[in-house]
């Protein structure tokens, strides 16, 4: 994976210093590190510790899965698949995407990736569609389809995450992205008043 691909994953996951529920009942910390039974971080972790956990997770989860790919890929495709694997795990990748990929069926790869937008609420057992996964799969598919050497039109996911956190801290509640123009409700209102 490229440094930019790793940064995209960290951006999707976002750094959280304390243990939290990932939305489907998994105890998580740092950059999406799912706590193993023997792990406990009662005082939280630093960003440096989170990066260390992240690097170990990539080495343990993503790299072995990428090594099983038998067809040539662009760096964008590798980075997209790395993000997907980090999020859904080796098993789901190996059962769903890898067979399509290793026969060169790129449309099948995309179709399989788009199926992974639901999670199980471990408290209720209910399967639910998660908006964050819909967005992430869309970004991964766009990156997978991007030509070699191209860059995305928007900033890396980490920039969006940091910006969103700053805006939420300032009390901004509604944000819609429309091209590259300001689309905050208060911006449009202030423009119409001037």
Image (spheres, rainbow, N blue to C red):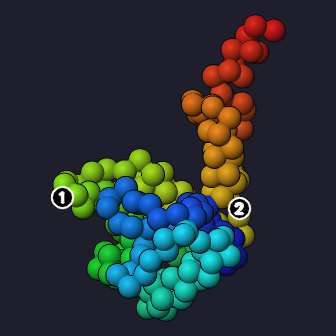
Q: Quadrant of the C terminus?
A: top right
Q: Could you say which quadrant of the image residue 17 lies in?
A: bottom right
SS class, disc 1: loop
> Which of pointers 1 and 2 lies earlier in the amino acid sequence?
1
Q: Which residue lies under the disc numbered 2?
A: 151
Q: Residue at x 22, y 58 (%)?
A: 123
Q: Which residue lies under the disc numbered 1?
A: 125
- The correct choice, above or below, for 37 with respect to 138 in the image is below
SS class, disc 2: loop
Q: Residues within 10 Å of mark 2 (few under 14, many from 20)?
A: few
Task: Where is residue 63? Give x, y as percent.
Answer: 52, 88
Task: Where is residue 173? Give x, y as percent.
Answer: 57, 31
- Residue reaching furthest top? 193
- Residue reaching furthest left? 125
- Residue reaching furthest right? 194
Q: Residue at x 68, y 76 (%)?
A: 48
Q: How many marks?
A: 2
Q: Residues within 10 Å of mark 1 (few under 14, many from 20)?
A: few
Q: Quadrant of the N terminus?
A: bottom right
Q: Residue at x 72, y 22 (%)?
A: 187
23 or 190, which lies in front? Answer: 23
For the question of whether residue 77 can be seen, the reply is no
156 or 50, which lies in front? Answer: 50
Check residue 87 in the rendering and tell me which mark sits there, or answer none. Answer: none
Task: Where is residue 171? Give x, y as percent.
Answer: 63, 31
- The correct choice, above or below, for 7 with respect to 71 in the image is above
86 or 146, which lies in front? Answer: 86
127 or 114, which lies in front? Answer: 127
Specify whether 91 is left or right of 43.
left
Q: Residue at x 37, y 55 (%)?
A: 23
Closer to viewer: mark 1 or mark 2 = 1
Label 1 – label 2 distance at C-alpha: 39 Å
């Amino acid at each position: 994976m490229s440094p930019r691909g790793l940064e995209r994953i960290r951006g999707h996951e976002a750094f959280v210093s304390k243990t939290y529920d990932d939305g489907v009942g998994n105890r998580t910390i740092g950059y999406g590190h799912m706590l193993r039974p023997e792990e406990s971080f009662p005082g939280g972790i630093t960003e440096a510790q989170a990066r260390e956990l992240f690097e170990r997770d990539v080495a343990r989860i993503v790299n072995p899965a990428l090594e099983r790919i038998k067809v040539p890929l662009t760096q964008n495709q590798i980075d997209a698949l790395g993000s997907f694997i980090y999020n859904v795990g080796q098993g789901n990748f190996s059962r769903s995407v890898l067979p399509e990929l290793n026969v060169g069926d790129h449309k099948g790869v995309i179709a399989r990736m788009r199926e992974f937008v639901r999670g199980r609420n471990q408290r209720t057992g209910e399967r639910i569609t998660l908006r964050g996964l819909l967005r992430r799969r869309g970004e991964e598919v766009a990156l997978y389809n991007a030509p070699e050497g191209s860059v995305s039109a928007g900033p890396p996911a980490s920039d969006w995450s940091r910006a969103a956190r700053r805006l939420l801290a300032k009390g901004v509640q509604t944000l819609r992205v429309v091209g590259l123009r300001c689309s905050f409700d208060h911006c449009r209102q202030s423009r119409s008043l001037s």
